[in-house]
Protein backbone atom coordinates (compact mmCIF):
# COMPACT_ATOMS: atom_id res chain seq x y z
CA UNK A 1 0.00 0.00 0.00
CA UNK A 2 1.12 3.61 -0.52
CA UNK A 3 2.28 4.98 2.81
CA UNK A 4 -0.49 7.09 4.46
CA UNK A 5 0.45 10.72 4.67
CA UNK A 6 3.30 10.16 2.23
CA UNK A 7 1.69 8.95 -0.98
CA UNK A 8 -2.01 8.54 -1.54
CA UNK A 9 -3.55 6.05 -3.97
CA UNK A 10 -4.58 7.39 -7.32
CA UNK A 11 -8.15 6.19 -6.76
CA UNK A 12 -8.52 8.23 -3.58
CA UNK A 13 -7.10 11.54 -4.78
CA UNK A 14 -6.72 13.68 -7.86
CA UNK A 15 -3.32 13.49 -9.55
CA UNK A 16 -0.89 15.75 -7.74
CA UNK A 17 0.66 18.73 -9.50
CA UNK A 18 4.29 17.96 -10.16
CA UNK A 19 7.22 20.28 -10.56
CA UNK A 20 8.87 19.13 -13.78
CA UNK A 21 12.22 20.46 -12.57
CA UNK A 22 12.21 18.22 -9.49
CA UNK A 23 13.46 14.65 -9.57
CA UNK A 24 10.55 12.19 -9.59
CA UNK A 25 11.34 9.19 -7.36
CA UNK A 26 9.54 5.91 -6.74
CA UNK A 27 10.65 4.84 -3.25
CA UNK A 28 10.02 1.30 -2.00
CA UNK A 29 10.77 0.19 1.58
CA UNK A 30 8.77 -2.02 3.93
CA UNK A 31 9.44 0.38 6.80
CA UNK A 32 7.11 3.42 6.67
CA UNK A 33 9.30 5.40 9.07
CA UNK A 34 12.24 5.11 6.68
CA UNK A 35 10.13 6.41 3.80
CA UNK A 36 8.77 9.27 5.90
CA UNK A 37 12.29 10.26 6.89
CA UNK A 38 13.48 10.14 3.28
CA UNK A 39 10.65 12.34 2.15
CA UNK A 40 11.35 14.94 4.82
CA UNK A 41 15.05 15.01 4.00
CA UNK A 42 14.74 15.06 0.21
CA UNK A 43 11.69 17.24 -0.45
CA UNK A 44 13.59 20.47 0.18
CA UNK A 45 16.46 19.22 -1.95
CA UNK A 46 14.37 19.00 -5.11
CA UNK A 47 12.94 15.45 -4.95
CA UNK A 48 9.31 14.35 -5.13
CA UNK A 49 8.79 10.85 -3.69
CA UNK A 50 5.96 8.41 -4.31
CA UNK A 51 6.43 5.98 -1.43
CA UNK A 52 5.29 2.35 -1.25
CA UNK A 53 5.78 -0.31 1.42
CA UNK A 54 4.68 -3.05 -0.98
CA UNK A 55 7.11 -3.94 -3.78
CA UNK A 56 4.30 -5.65 -5.72
CA UNK A 57 2.18 -2.49 -5.70
CA UNK A 58 5.20 -0.45 -6.74
CA UNK A 59 5.78 -2.88 -9.60
CA UNK A 60 2.15 -2.42 -10.70
CA UNK A 61 2.68 1.35 -10.77
CA UNK A 62 5.75 0.96 -12.98
CA UNK A 63 3.91 -1.40 -15.33
CA UNK A 64 0.93 0.96 -15.61
CA UNK A 65 3.13 3.78 -16.85
CA UNK A 66 0.93 6.28 -15.00
CA UNK A 67 3.96 8.27 -13.88
CA UNK A 68 7.31 8.94 -15.50
CA UNK A 69 9.89 8.50 -12.79
CA UNK A 70 13.51 9.61 -12.95
CA UNK A 71 14.73 6.86 -10.62
CA UNK A 72 13.71 4.12 -8.22
CA UNK A 73 14.95 4.00 -4.62
CA UNK A 74 14.65 0.36 -3.60
CA UNK A 75 15.25 -1.42 -0.29
CA UNK A 76 17.11 -4.72 -0.55
CA UNK A 77 15.50 -6.68 2.30
CA UNK A 78 11.70 -6.84 2.13
CA UNK A 79 9.53 -9.86 3.12
CA UNK A 80 7.09 -9.72 0.20
CA UNK A 81 9.77 -9.55 -2.47
CA UNK A 82 13.43 -8.65 -2.07
CA UNK A 83 14.84 -5.61 -3.79
CA UNK A 84 17.24 -7.81 -5.72
CA UNK A 85 14.24 -9.69 -7.13
CA UNK A 86 12.37 -6.50 -7.99
CA UNK A 87 15.44 -4.87 -9.58
CA UNK A 88 15.50 -6.89 -12.85
CA UNK A 89 11.72 -6.58 -13.19
CA UNK A 90 11.97 -2.80 -12.95
CA UNK A 91 14.83 -2.72 -15.48
CA UNK A 92 12.79 -4.91 -17.83
CA UNK A 93 9.90 -2.43 -17.73
CA UNK A 94 12.15 0.58 -18.38
CA UNK A 95 15.76 -0.07 -19.23
CA UNK A 96 16.60 3.63 -18.86
CA UNK A 97 15.25 3.85 -15.30
CA UNK A 98 18.15 3.86 -12.80
CA UNK A 99 17.68 1.96 -9.55
CA UNK A 100 19.50 2.97 -6.37
CA UNK A 101 19.48 0.23 -3.73
CA UNK A 102 19.02 0.80 0.01
CA UNK A 103 20.65 -1.71 2.33
CA UNK A 104 21.76 -2.06 5.92
CA UNK A 105 24.27 -4.70 4.79
CA UNK A 106 27.59 -3.09 3.93
CA UNK A 107 29.21 -6.30 2.70
CA UNK A 108 30.82 -6.39 -0.73
CA UNK A 109 28.70 -9.43 -1.64
CA UNK A 110 25.46 -7.42 -1.45
CA UNK A 111 26.97 -4.53 -3.40
CA UNK A 112 28.27 -6.83 -6.14
CA UNK A 113 24.88 -8.52 -6.45
CA UNK A 114 23.15 -5.15 -6.75
CA UNK A 115 25.53 -3.72 -9.33
CA UNK A 116 25.60 -6.93 -11.38
CA UNK A 117 21.81 -6.89 -11.34
CA UNK A 118 21.85 -3.49 -13.01
CA UNK A 119 21.65 -1.10 -10.04
CA UNK A 120 22.99 2.38 -10.67
CA UNK A 121 24.38 2.67 -7.15
CA UNK A 122 23.62 1.67 -3.59
CA UNK A 123 23.25 3.53 -0.28
CA UNK A 124 23.91 2.07 3.16
CA UNK A 125 21.55 2.69 6.07
CA UNK A 126 21.48 4.71 8.21
CA UNK A 127 21.61 7.61 5.76
CA UNK A 128 23.59 10.02 7.91
CA UNK A 129 24.49 12.55 5.19
CA UNK A 130 21.37 13.85 3.34
CA UNK A 131 23.45 15.99 0.98
CA UNK A 132 25.51 13.01 -0.16
CA UNK A 133 22.31 11.01 -0.66
CA UNK A 134 20.84 13.87 -2.70
CA UNK A 135 23.96 14.02 -4.90
CA UNK A 136 23.80 10.28 -5.61
CA UNK A 137 20.10 10.40 -6.45
CA UNK A 138 20.48 13.54 -8.57
CA UNK A 139 23.21 11.83 -10.60
CA UNK A 140 20.90 8.88 -11.18
CA UNK A 141 18.07 11.19 -12.23
CA UNK A 142 20.34 13.11 -14.55
CA UNK A 143 21.49 9.87 -16.20
CA UNK A 144 17.89 8.84 -16.73
CA UNK A 145 16.88 12.11 -18.35
CA UNK A 146 20.02 12.06 -20.47
CA UNK A 147 19.26 8.56 -21.78
CA UNK A 148 15.60 9.36 -22.40
CA UNK A 149 16.50 12.57 -24.17
CA UNK A 150 18.89 10.65 -26.40
CA UNK A 151 16.16 8.13 -27.23
CA UNK A 152 13.66 10.89 -27.98
CA UNK A 153 16.17 12.69 -30.17
CA UNK A 154 16.98 9.49 -32.04
CA UNK A 155 13.34 9.34 -33.08
CA UNK A 156 13.68 12.84 -34.51
CA UNK A 157 16.87 12.21 -36.47
CA UNK A 158 14.83 11.70 -39.63
CA UNK A 159 13.72 15.33 -39.34
CA UNK A 160 17.35 16.41 -39.36
CA UNK A 161 18.11 14.20 -42.38
CA UNK A 162 16.77 16.92 -44.64
CA UNK A 163 20.22 18.39 -43.97
CA UNK A 164 21.87 15.14 -44.91
CA UNK A 165 24.10 13.88 -42.08
CA UNK A 166 23.93 17.09 -40.03
CA UNK A 167 22.45 16.29 -36.63
CA UNK A 168 21.66 18.59 -33.74
CA UNK A 169 18.86 20.16 -31.75
CA UNK A 170 20.56 23.01 -29.89
CA UNK A 171 19.65 26.61 -30.78
CA UNK A 172 23.06 27.08 -32.40
CA UNK A 173 22.50 24.17 -34.81
CA UNK A 174 18.89 25.10 -35.49
CA UNK A 175 20.19 28.50 -36.55
CA UNK A 176 22.67 26.81 -38.89
CA UNK A 177 19.89 24.67 -40.38
CA UNK A 178 17.78 27.79 -40.91
CA UNK A 179 20.64 29.57 -42.66
CA UNK A 180 21.22 26.58 -44.94
CA UNK A 181 17.56 26.62 -45.95
CA UNK A 182 17.71 30.35 -46.74
CA UNK A 183 20.91 30.39 -48.79
CA UNK A 184 20.58 27.05 -50.60
CA UNK A 185 18.54 28.35 -53.54
CA UNK A 186 20.10 31.82 -53.79
CA UNK A 187 23.13 30.55 -55.77
CA UNK A 188 25.48 33.06 -54.10
CA UNK A 189 28.95 32.15 -52.92
CA UNK A 190 29.09 31.00 -49.30
CA UNK A 191 32.00 31.11 -46.84
CA UNK A 192 31.76 28.59 -44.00
CA UNK A 193 33.89 29.32 -40.95
CA UNK A 194 34.54 27.06 -38.00
CA UNK A 195 37.19 25.08 -36.20
CA UNK A 196 38.64 21.95 -37.73
CA UNK A 197 36.26 19.02 -37.40
CA UNK A 198 33.02 21.00 -37.00
CA UNK A 199 31.49 19.62 -40.21
CA UNK A 200 32.11 22.33 -42.78
CA UNK A 201 32.03 19.93 -45.73
CA UNK A 202 28.75 18.43 -44.49
CA UNK A 203 27.25 21.91 -44.47
CA UNK A 204 28.54 22.53 -47.99
CA UNK A 205 26.98 19.27 -49.19
CA UNK A 206 23.70 20.16 -47.49
CA UNK A 207 23.64 23.54 -49.28
CA UNK A 208 24.30 21.80 -52.60
CA UNK A 209 21.72 19.07 -52.06
CA UNK A 210 18.99 21.61 -51.21
CA UNK A 211 19.82 23.90 -54.11
CA UNK A 212 18.67 23.98 -57.74
CA UNK A 213 22.10 22.54 -58.61
CA UNK A 214 21.48 19.31 -56.68
CA UNK A 215 21.36 17.27 -59.91
CA UNK A 216 24.78 18.60 -60.89
CA UNK A 217 28.14 17.46 -59.50
CA UNK A 218 29.46 18.30 -56.04
CA UNK A 219 33.25 18.49 -56.13
CA UNK A 220 35.36 19.01 -53.00
CA UNK A 221 39.01 20.01 -52.80
CA UNK A 222 41.11 20.52 -49.67
CA UNK A 223 43.42 23.35 -50.66
CA UNK A 224 45.56 22.92 -47.58
CA UNK A 225 46.51 19.36 -48.54
CA UNK A 226 47.92 20.20 -52.00
CA UNK A 227 51.55 21.26 -52.61
CA UNK A 228 51.86 24.82 -53.88
CA UNK A 229 53.39 23.63 -57.15
CA UNK A 230 50.33 21.54 -57.98
CA UNK A 231 47.43 23.68 -56.79
CA UNK A 232 47.08 25.58 -60.10
CA UNK A 233 46.71 22.28 -61.91
CA UNK A 234 44.19 20.94 -59.38
CA UNK A 235 42.05 24.07 -59.59
CA UNK A 236 42.23 25.02 -63.26
CA UNK A 237 43.46 21.85 -64.99
CA UNK A 238 46.41 21.40 -67.30
CA UNK A 239 47.20 20.34 -70.84
CA UNK A 240 49.39 17.43 -71.80
CA UNK A 241 53.07 18.36 -71.46
CA UNK A 242 52.31 21.54 -69.52
CA UNK A 243 54.95 20.54 -66.97
CA UNK A 244 57.18 17.59 -66.14
CA UNK A 245 54.97 14.59 -65.39
CA UNK A 246 51.91 15.96 -67.19
CA UNK A 247 51.49 12.90 -69.41
CA UNK A 248 47.85 13.70 -70.10
CA UNK A 249 45.39 16.55 -69.92
CA UNK A 250 43.34 17.15 -66.78
CA UNK A 251 40.23 19.34 -66.58
CA UNK A 252 40.63 20.67 -62.98
CA UNK A 253 37.96 20.95 -60.31
CA UNK A 254 36.27 24.03 -61.78
CA UNK A 255 35.57 22.15 -65.00
CA UNK A 256 34.57 19.00 -63.10
CA UNK A 257 32.03 20.99 -61.06
CA UNK A 258 30.46 22.70 -64.10
CA UNK A 259 26.71 22.92 -63.54
CA UNK A 260 27.06 22.09 -59.88
CA UNK A 261 28.89 23.20 -56.74
CA UNK A 262 32.61 23.44 -55.94
CA UNK A 263 33.68 23.22 -52.31
CA UNK A 264 37.14 24.62 -51.59
CA UNK A 265 38.14 23.68 -48.06
CA UNK A 266 40.91 25.55 -46.19
CA UNK A 267 40.76 28.42 -48.69
CA UNK A 268 42.97 30.45 -46.37
CA UNK A 269 45.92 28.20 -47.28
CA UNK A 270 45.89 29.13 -50.98
CA UNK A 271 49.11 31.00 -51.94
CA UNK A 272 48.75 34.69 -52.90
CA UNK A 273 49.65 34.23 -56.61
CA UNK A 274 46.99 31.51 -56.94
CA UNK A 275 44.50 33.75 -55.14
CA UNK A 276 44.78 36.28 -57.96
CA UNK A 277 44.11 33.66 -60.64
CA UNK A 278 41.20 32.32 -58.57
CA UNK A 279 39.73 35.82 -58.38
CA UNK A 280 39.87 36.16 -62.17
CA UNK A 281 38.03 32.88 -62.63
CA UNK A 282 35.27 34.02 -60.28
CA UNK A 283 35.00 37.44 -61.93
CA UNK A 284 35.07 36.28 -65.55
CA UNK A 285 33.28 32.95 -65.27
CA UNK A 286 35.87 31.17 -67.37
CA UNK A 287 38.97 29.12 -66.69
CA UNK A 288 42.29 28.65 -68.49
CA UNK A 289 44.14 25.37 -68.01
CA UNK A 290 47.84 25.43 -67.14
CA UNK A 291 49.73 25.30 -70.42
CA UNK A 292 46.58 26.05 -72.42
CA UNK A 293 45.98 28.93 -74.84
CA UNK A 294 42.21 29.25 -74.67
CA UNK A 295 39.55 29.51 -71.97
CA UNK A 296 36.37 27.60 -71.32
CA UNK A 297 33.23 28.98 -69.65
CA UNK A 298 32.26 27.51 -66.29
CA UNK A 299 28.99 27.64 -64.38
CA UNK A 300 29.89 26.85 -60.79
CA UNK A 301 28.64 27.86 -57.36
CA UNK A 302 31.66 28.23 -55.10
CA UNK A 303 31.41 27.29 -51.44
CA UNK A 304 34.54 27.83 -49.39
CA UNK A 305 35.55 27.00 -45.84
CA UNK A 306 38.34 27.89 -43.46
CA UNK A 307 39.30 27.55 -39.82
CA UNK A 308 41.43 30.71 -39.91
CA UNK A 309 40.26 34.30 -39.44
CA UNK A 310 40.25 35.64 -43.01
CA UNK A 311 39.64 39.22 -41.89
CA UNK A 312 42.82 39.05 -39.86
CA UNK A 313 44.57 37.39 -42.81
CA UNK A 314 43.54 40.23 -45.11
CA UNK A 315 44.79 42.79 -42.57
CA UNK A 316 48.18 41.06 -42.51
CA UNK A 317 48.24 40.84 -46.34
CA UNK A 318 48.11 37.03 -46.27
CA UNK A 319 44.78 36.94 -48.10
CA UNK A 320 43.48 39.21 -50.85
CA UNK A 321 40.74 41.55 -49.68
CA UNK A 322 39.00 41.56 -53.08
CA UNK A 323 38.91 37.74 -53.13
CA UNK A 324 37.61 37.72 -49.56
CA UNK A 325 34.65 39.91 -50.55
CA UNK A 326 34.02 37.77 -53.62
CA UNK A 327 33.85 34.58 -51.55
CA UNK A 328 32.17 35.99 -48.44
CA UNK A 329 28.78 36.91 -49.91
CA UNK A 330 27.08 34.83 -47.21
CA UNK A 331 28.96 33.79 -44.10
CA UNK A 332 28.00 30.72 -42.08
CA UNK A 333 29.70 30.21 -38.73
CA UNK A 334 29.67 26.71 -37.24
CA UNK A 335 29.77 26.32 -33.45
CA UNK A 336 32.45 24.24 -31.81
CA UNK A 337 31.17 21.02 -30.25
CA UNK A 338 32.16 22.26 -26.76
CA UNK A 339 29.66 25.10 -27.29
CA UNK A 340 26.82 22.68 -27.99
CA UNK A 341 27.52 19.81 -25.61
CA UNK A 342 23.78 19.13 -25.35
CA UNK A 343 24.02 17.74 -28.90
CA UNK A 344 26.62 15.13 -27.90
CA UNK A 345 24.12 12.37 -26.93
CA UNK A 346 22.25 12.44 -30.24
CA UNK A 347 25.44 12.93 -32.25
CA UNK A 348 27.17 10.02 -30.52
CA UNK A 349 24.16 7.74 -30.98
CA UNK A 350 23.78 8.77 -34.62
CA UNK A 351 27.47 8.08 -35.33
CA UNK A 352 27.26 4.78 -33.46
CA UNK A 353 24.34 3.63 -35.61
CA UNK A 354 26.08 4.84 -38.77
CA UNK A 355 29.34 2.96 -38.18
CA UNK A 356 27.74 -0.11 -36.62
CA UNK A 357 25.71 -0.49 -39.81
CA UNK A 358 28.77 0.14 -41.97
CA UNK A 359 30.75 -2.70 -40.38
CA UNK A 360 27.79 -5.09 -40.36
CA UNK A 361 26.81 -5.10 -36.67
CA UNK A 362 23.31 -6.55 -36.59
CA UNK A 363 22.53 -5.87 -32.93
CA UNK A 364 21.40 -2.44 -31.79
CA UNK A 365 24.36 -0.70 -30.15
CA UNK A 366 24.14 1.81 -27.30
CA UNK A 367 26.32 3.62 -24.78
CA UNK A 368 26.31 2.85 -21.08
CA UNK A 369 25.23 5.66 -18.80
CA UNK A 370 28.77 6.27 -17.57
CA UNK A 371 30.21 6.24 -21.09
CA UNK A 372 27.63 8.77 -22.25
CA UNK A 373 28.35 10.96 -19.25
CA UNK A 374 32.06 10.92 -20.10
CA UNK A 375 31.25 11.99 -23.67
CA UNK A 376 29.05 14.81 -22.42
CA UNK A 377 31.61 16.45 -20.12
CA UNK A 378 34.62 16.19 -22.44
CA UNK A 379 35.70 19.42 -24.18
CA UNK A 380 36.11 17.94 -27.72
CA UNK A 381 38.99 20.06 -29.03
CA UNK A 382 38.78 18.04 -32.26
CA UNK A 383 35.02 18.64 -32.48
CA UNK A 384 32.70 16.22 -34.31
CA UNK A 385 35.60 14.60 -36.15
CA UNK A 386 37.16 13.63 -32.82
CA UNK A 387 33.81 12.33 -31.56
CA UNK A 388 33.42 10.18 -34.68
CA UNK A 389 36.95 8.84 -34.22
CA UNK A 390 36.14 7.96 -30.59
CA UNK A 391 32.93 6.18 -31.63
CA UNK A 392 34.76 4.12 -34.26
CA UNK A 393 37.44 3.16 -31.74
CA UNK A 394 34.81 2.20 -29.18
CA UNK A 395 33.08 -0.02 -31.72
CA UNK A 396 36.34 -1.77 -32.51
CA UNK A 397 37.02 -2.33 -28.80
CA UNK A 398 33.53 -3.65 -27.96
CA UNK A 399 32.34 -7.22 -28.50
CA UNK A 400 28.81 -6.83 -27.12
CA UNK A 401 26.12 -4.27 -27.81
CA UNK A 402 26.99 -1.76 -25.05
CA UNK A 403 29.82 0.75 -25.25
CA UNK A 404 31.35 1.07 -21.77
CA UNK A 405 34.01 3.40 -20.34
CA UNK A 406 37.04 1.16 -21.08
CA UNK A 407 36.25 1.30 -24.81
CA UNK A 408 36.67 5.08 -24.89
CA UNK A 409 40.06 6.82 -25.16
CA UNK A 410 41.59 7.72 -21.79
CA UNK A 411 41.72 11.42 -22.66
CA UNK A 412 37.90 11.38 -22.82
CA UNK A 413 37.26 9.40 -19.65
CA UNK A 414 39.87 11.30 -17.64
CA UNK A 415 37.56 14.24 -16.98
CA UNK A 416 34.89 11.99 -15.55
CA UNK A 417 37.38 10.24 -13.29
CA UNK A 418 38.56 13.62 -12.01
CA UNK A 419 35.07 14.87 -11.22
CA UNK A 420 33.71 11.78 -9.50
CA UNK A 421 34.99 8.43 -8.29
CA UNK A 422 33.94 5.69 -10.67
CA UNK A 423 31.07 3.75 -9.08
CA UNK A 424 29.56 2.09 -12.13
CA UNK A 425 29.55 -1.59 -12.98
CA UNK A 426 33.14 -1.21 -14.22
CA UNK A 427 34.13 -0.82 -10.53
CA UNK A 428 32.73 -4.12 -9.29
CA UNK A 429 36.24 -5.41 -8.66
CA UNK A 430 36.84 -2.73 -6.01
CA UNK A 431 33.28 -2.26 -4.86
CA UNK A 432 34.19 -2.66 -1.21
CA UNK A 433 36.12 0.60 -1.46
CA UNK A 434 33.12 2.64 -2.57
CA UNK A 435 31.92 5.34 -0.17
CA UNK A 436 28.85 4.30 1.78
CA UNK A 437 26.82 7.33 0.78
CA UNK A 438 27.78 7.67 -2.86
CA UNK A 439 30.57 9.25 -4.92
CA UNK A 440 32.83 12.03 -3.72
CA UNK A 441 32.06 15.40 -5.31
CA UNK A 442 33.88 18.72 -5.19
CA UNK A 443 32.27 21.66 -3.41
CA UNK A 444 29.33 22.58 -5.65
CA UNK A 445 27.75 25.28 -3.52
CA UNK A 446 28.79 27.90 -6.08
CA UNK A 447 26.42 26.28 -8.60
CA UNK A 448 23.31 27.21 -6.61
CA UNK A 449 22.68 30.34 -8.69
CA UNK A 450 23.35 28.69 -12.05
CA UNK A 451 21.43 26.33 -14.31
CA UNK A 452 22.80 22.86 -15.01
CA UNK A 453 24.32 23.66 -18.44
CA UNK A 454 26.08 26.80 -17.18
CA UNK A 455 27.28 25.06 -14.01
CA UNK A 456 28.59 22.10 -16.01
CA UNK A 457 30.45 24.45 -18.35
CA UNK A 458 31.97 26.35 -15.44
CA UNK A 459 33.03 23.16 -13.66
CA UNK A 460 34.58 21.84 -16.88
CA UNK A 461 36.45 25.11 -17.37
CA UNK A 462 37.85 24.92 -13.84
CA UNK A 463 38.92 21.31 -14.37
CA UNK A 464 40.57 22.09 -17.73
CA UNK A 465 42.53 25.00 -16.38
CA UNK A 466 43.71 23.15 -13.26
CA UNK A 467 44.61 20.00 -15.23
CA UNK A 468 46.54 21.78 -17.97
CA UNK A 469 48.32 24.12 -15.55
CA UNK A 470 49.53 21.10 -13.57
CA UNK A 471 50.44 19.29 -16.80
CA UNK A 472 52.57 22.21 -18.02
CA UNK A 473 54.34 22.32 -14.65
CA UNK A 474 55.02 18.60 -14.90
CA UNK A 475 56.39 18.85 -18.45
CA UNK A 476 58.30 22.11 -17.76
CA UNK A 477 56.15 23.91 -20.30
CA UNK A 478 56.94 21.62 -23.23
CA UNK A 479 53.72 21.54 -25.25
CA UNK A 480 54.76 18.56 -27.37
CA UNK A 481 55.43 16.50 -24.26
CA UNK A 482 52.24 17.75 -22.61
CA UNK A 483 50.23 16.74 -25.68
CA UNK A 484 51.79 13.27 -25.58
CA UNK A 485 50.98 12.82 -21.88
CA UNK A 486 47.41 14.13 -22.31
CA UNK A 487 46.87 11.97 -25.40
CA UNK A 488 45.64 14.79 -27.63
CA UNK A 489 46.89 16.43 -30.81
CA UNK A 490 49.51 19.15 -30.25
CA UNK A 491 47.65 21.74 -32.34
CA UNK A 492 44.44 21.06 -30.45
CA UNK A 493 46.26 21.40 -27.12
CA UNK A 494 47.71 24.74 -28.21
CA UNK A 495 44.21 25.92 -29.15
CA UNK A 496 42.82 24.94 -25.73
CA UNK A 497 45.77 26.57 -23.93
CA UNK A 498 45.22 29.77 -25.89
CA UNK A 499 41.52 29.79 -25.00
CA UNK A 500 42.36 29.33 -21.30
CA UNK A 501 45.10 31.98 -21.35
CA UNK A 502 47.88 29.47 -20.62
CA UNK A 503 51.26 29.31 -22.32
CA UNK A 504 54.04 26.79 -22.51
CA UNK A 505 57.76 27.44 -22.77
CA UNK A 506 60.52 25.61 -24.55
CA UNK A 507 58.07 24.49 -27.28
CA UNK A 508 60.14 24.97 -30.39
Image (cartoon, helix red, strand yellow):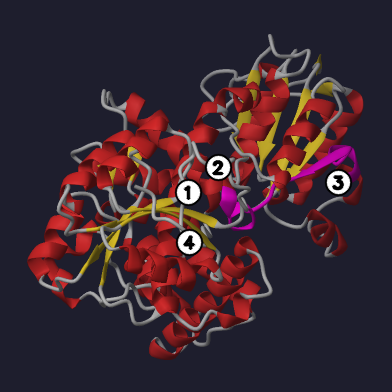
- Of the two numbered discs 4 and 2 on the same chain, state the one appearing first in sequence: 2
Viewer-closest of 408 and 305: 408
Camera sees residue 235: yes
Q: Given this view, does label 4 or label 1 mark the residue nearer the observer?
A: 1
For the residues labelled 3 and 2, the Cα–Cα distance comes to 68 Å
Relative image position of residue 137 (x, y in whole percent)? 41, 63
The residue under label 1 is 8
* Secondary element at tag 3: helix
Q: Nearer the viewer, residue 97 or 171?
A: 97
Task: Give the Cα distance between marks 3 and 4.
Answer: 35 Å
Mark nearer the N terminus (2 vs 1): 1
Q: Mark 4 and mark 2: span between their CA atoms?
A: 46 Å
Across and down, in percent, residue 118 comes to 23, 49
Picture disc at residue 324: 3
Counting from the top left corner in percent of width and height, residue 222 is at 60, 39
What residue sits 17% from the left and 48% below the top? Answer: 80
Q: What residue would you read off at disc 4?
A: 378
Say few, some or many: other residues with alpha carbon within 10 Å of mark 4 (under 14 / 14 to 19 / 20 or more): many
- Horizontally, is 236 left or right of 436 in the view? right
Amino acid sequence: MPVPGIAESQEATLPRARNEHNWQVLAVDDQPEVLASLQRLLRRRGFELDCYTSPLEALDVLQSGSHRYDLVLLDVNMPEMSGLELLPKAKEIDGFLPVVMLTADDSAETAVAALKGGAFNYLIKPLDDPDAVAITLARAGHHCRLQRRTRDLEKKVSESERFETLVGSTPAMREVFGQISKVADSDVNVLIQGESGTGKELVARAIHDRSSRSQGPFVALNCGAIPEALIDSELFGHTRGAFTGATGARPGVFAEAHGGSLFLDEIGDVPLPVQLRLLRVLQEGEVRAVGGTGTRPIDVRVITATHVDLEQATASKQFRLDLYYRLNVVNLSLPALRDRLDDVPILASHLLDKHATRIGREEKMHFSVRAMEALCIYDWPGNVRELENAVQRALAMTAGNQIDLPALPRRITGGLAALTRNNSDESIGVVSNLPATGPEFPDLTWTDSHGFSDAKRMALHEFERAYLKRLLERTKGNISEAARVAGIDRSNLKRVLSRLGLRGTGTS
